[in-house]
Image (tube, coloured by chain):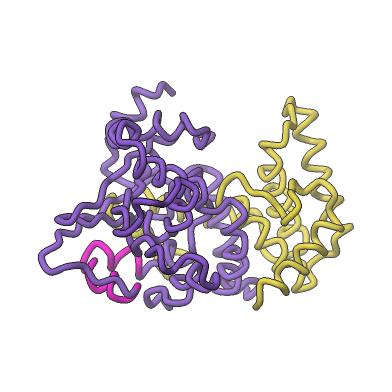
């Protein structure tokens, strides 16, 4: 995958989703996990899991919901809404369900807590199934 | 949570915050179901590296090379010295700068996940997040260095620093020889991302002005990151 191909993929996402924070050279991320969430979304779009208008609808619902519950929406919480939208659309399209996602969350949390500091956190195979 | 409390808090186990757990859970299920390929995802994320970029860190290092007072401040209180250049994280991570000397070479890792001084270095490269780097750098740092084509003079001590959610490390590399005449901005161009993680050394002045291929050298020469 060349940088050029990646940037044209970005352009498609940027054209479709007006609200993505960006500068002249592409999307801007404040923290690494934001880029991970963005990249996962791009990959799922390319797998045909949803169209950009479908994504935009779920994302704007999440943003509206957060605003309704008092989020000042200054831009710094944008990718939190993005992450919530990603969880929802993945469940809505039947890739997984909330229970399984919750189970993985608990498994990772458990793995982190039982890993002595200084060792890599890994999810053991038998736990994730 | 008060800052004081954060800095003295001692963890004997690891911790991932809510957002990190949610991102990991999604990644796990999407990988299991074949929707994403972690390697392809990493390559995509790598293209954003220059967006945030290690330029902030390079500016910090170059400043320390030309300004002795700043250097001492940086080694004593990196959080404040870096914040004075307006490069602080939004969560107020505690920064520690470790200095390379002819006797000692420093390397940074996050053995448990991928804690990284992103306000100064941007997004972590995929090899930094890989399990092989995280586990091997602690056990056998010199062979990891060899894979990055770094050979240190015989007898150099290697110290590996393990980042946590609370403390992030930045390596202050040694100023290359023959750079007395260079300005701060030119010096900053010599400071590679890898030289601030400790998996590389700064460029020599002769390398300046050549093509840009050196910038990505380490990404392609990463240590064996296959599972």
Q: Which quadrant is home to the C terminus of chain B?
A: bottom left
Q: Which shade of the palette goes to chain A?
A: yellow
User: Which of B61 and B108 lies nearest the eye of the viewer?
Assistant: B61
For the point 37% across and 38% down, the residue is B95
Q: Tell me if I can see residue B53 in this picture.
A: yes
Indicate whether B42 appears above or below B69: below
For the point 38% across and 67% down, the residue is B131
For the point 50% across and 35% down, the residue is B88
Q: Tell me if I can see residue A100 in this picture.
A: no
Tell me the magenta residue range: B133-148
Judge from the rendering whether residue B73 lies leftward or rightward of residue B140; answer left or right. right
Chain with purple colouring: B
User: Which of B52 and B166 lies nearest the eye of the viewer?
Assistant: B52
Rendered image quadrant of residue B1: top left
Residue pushed farthest front?
B181
Judge from the rendering whether residue B122 lies leftward or rightward of residue A35; answer left or right. left
Characterize the magenta stretch by its predominant secondary structure: helix
For the point 76% across and 52% down, the residue is A24
């Amino acid at each position: 995958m060349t940088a050029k191909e990646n940037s044209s993929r970005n352009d498609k996402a940027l054209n479709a989703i007006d609200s993505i924070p960006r500068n002249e050279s592409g999307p801007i991320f404040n923290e690494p996990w934001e880029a991970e969430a963005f990249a996962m979304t791009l990959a799922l779009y390319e797998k045909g899991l949803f169209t950009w208008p479908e994504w935009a609808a779920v994302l704007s619902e999440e943003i509206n919901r957060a605003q309704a519950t008092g989020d000042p929406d200054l831009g710094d919480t944008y990718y939190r809404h993005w992450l919530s939208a990603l969880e929802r659309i993945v469940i809505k399209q039947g890739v997984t369900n909330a229970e399984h996602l919750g189970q993985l969350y608990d498994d990772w949390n458990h793995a982190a807590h039982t890993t002595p500091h200084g060792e890599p956190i890994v999810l053991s195979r038998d736990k994730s199934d | 949570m008060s800052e004081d409390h954060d800095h003295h808090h001692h963890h004997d186990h690891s911790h991932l915050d809510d957002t990190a757990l949610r991102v990991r859970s999604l990644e796990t299920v999407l990988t299991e179901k074949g929707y994403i390929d972690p390697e392809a995802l990493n390559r995509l994320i790598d293209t954003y590296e220059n967006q945030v970029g290690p330029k902030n860190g390079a500016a910090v290092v170059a400043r320390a090379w030309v300004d002795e007072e700043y250097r001492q401040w940086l080694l004593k209180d990196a959080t404040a010295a870096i914040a004075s250049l307006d490069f602080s994280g939004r969560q107020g991570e505690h920064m520690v700068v470790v200095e390379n000397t002819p006797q000692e070479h420093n390397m940074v890792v996050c053995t448990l996940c991928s804690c990284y001084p992103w306000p100064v270095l941007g997004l972590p490269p995929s090899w930094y997040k890989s399990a092989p780097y995280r586990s091997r750098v602690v056990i056998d740092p010199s062979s990891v260095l060899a894979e990055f084509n770094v050979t240190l003079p015989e007898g150099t001590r290697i110290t590996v620093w393990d980042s946590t959610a609370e403390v992030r490390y930045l390596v202050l590399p040694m100023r290359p020889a023959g750079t007395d005449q260079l300005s701060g901005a030119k010096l900053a161009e010599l400071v590679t991302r890898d030289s601030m993680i400790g998996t590389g050394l700064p460029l020599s002045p002769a390398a300046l002005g050549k093509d840009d291929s050196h910038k990505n050298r380490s990404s392609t020469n990463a240590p064996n990151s296959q599972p």
